Image (cartoon, rainbow, N blue to C red):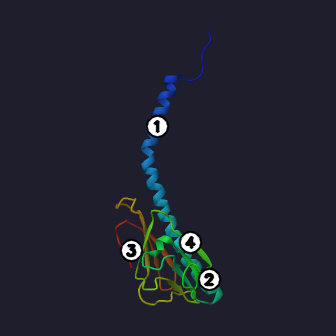
């Protein structure tokens, strides 16, 4: 007697349909996961830029600035650059490093006065003594509940802190 090995067409169709149902259930959660990772990555890049500017200021014993790509309170979402304090915008040849913005990620700043840049002095401290600049990195694609946004806070000593928060909450001072 001979036994057939393998799948019948019916068994294969059932397996493919189950796989399709599982994929359909996982797809929305995967989309939120990707957007959350973009937000976390953008907040990490912003903190990295602040740390880079601080270390360059100490290393070169000169003032270094982190400048938004678009000079406005909310121009940080388009990207930013690290450059000597004498540089006016990110198009200058003296820019040390550029950071690009990510799609569907918003960055809003608070306690940051015009010209909307962060200045690090040659000793690594921030150039402005009043206020504590903070940035909120979020995405309108994520739900308002849950820890879906990040706050990037700067201390007067020039150090950076990143914390999780809800999308609609303000960053702590």
Q: Is residue 67 left or right of residue 167?
A: right
Give the mark nearer the N terminus: 1 vs 2. Answer: 1
- Could you tell me which residue is drawn at 38 percent across and 74 percent down? 171
Q: Give the position of the N terminus as an image quadrant.
A: top right
Give the mark nearer the N terminus: 4 vs 1. Answer: 1
Q: Which residue carries the number 3 mark?
A: 171
Residue 95 percent coordinates (x, y): 61, 80
Under circle 2, the secondary element is helix
Residue 20 percent coordinates (x, y): 46, 37
Crowd tier of the residue under label 4, counting other residues whose Cα lies within 10 Å: few below 14, some 14–19, many 20 or above: some
Give the mark nearer the N terminus: 3 vs 4. Answer: 4
Q: Which residue carries the number 4 mark?
A: 99
Q: Which residue carries the number 2 mark?
A: 56
Say which quarter of the image contains residue 173.
bottom left
Of the two numbered discs 4 and 1 in the rendering, the one whose residue sits closer to the viewer = 4
Of the two numbered discs 3 and 4 in the rendering, the one whose residue sits closer to the viewer = 4
Q: CA distance from mark 1 to mark 3?
A: 41 Å
Q: Which residue carries the number 1 mark?
A: 20
Give the mark nearer the N terminus: 2 vs 4. Answer: 2
Q: CA distance from mark 3 to mark 4?
A: 22 Å
- Could you tell me which residue is drawn at 49 percent across and 32 percent down? 16
């Amino acid at each position: 007697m001979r036994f057939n090995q393998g799948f019948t067409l019916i068994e294969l169709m059932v397996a493919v349909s189950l796989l399709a149902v599982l994929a359909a259930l996982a797809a929305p959660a995967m989309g939120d996961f990707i957007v959350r990772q973009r937000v976390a990555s953008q907040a990490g890049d912003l903190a990295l830029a602040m740390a880079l500017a601080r270390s360059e200021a100490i290393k070169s014993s000169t003032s270094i600035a982190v400048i938004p790509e678009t000079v406005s309170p909310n121009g940080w979402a388009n990207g930013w650059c690290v450059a000597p304090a004498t540089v006016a915008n990110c198009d200058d040849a003296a820019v040390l490093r550029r950071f690009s913005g990510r799609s569907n990620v918003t960055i809003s700043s608070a306690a940051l006065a015009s010209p909307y840049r962060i200045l690090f002095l040659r000793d690594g401290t921030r150039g402005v003594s009043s206020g504590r600049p903070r940035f909120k990195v979020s995405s309108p694609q994520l739900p308002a509940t849950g820890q879906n946004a990040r706050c990037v806070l700067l201390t007067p000593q020039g150090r950076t802190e990143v914390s999780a928060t809800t999308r609609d909450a303000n960053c702590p001072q």
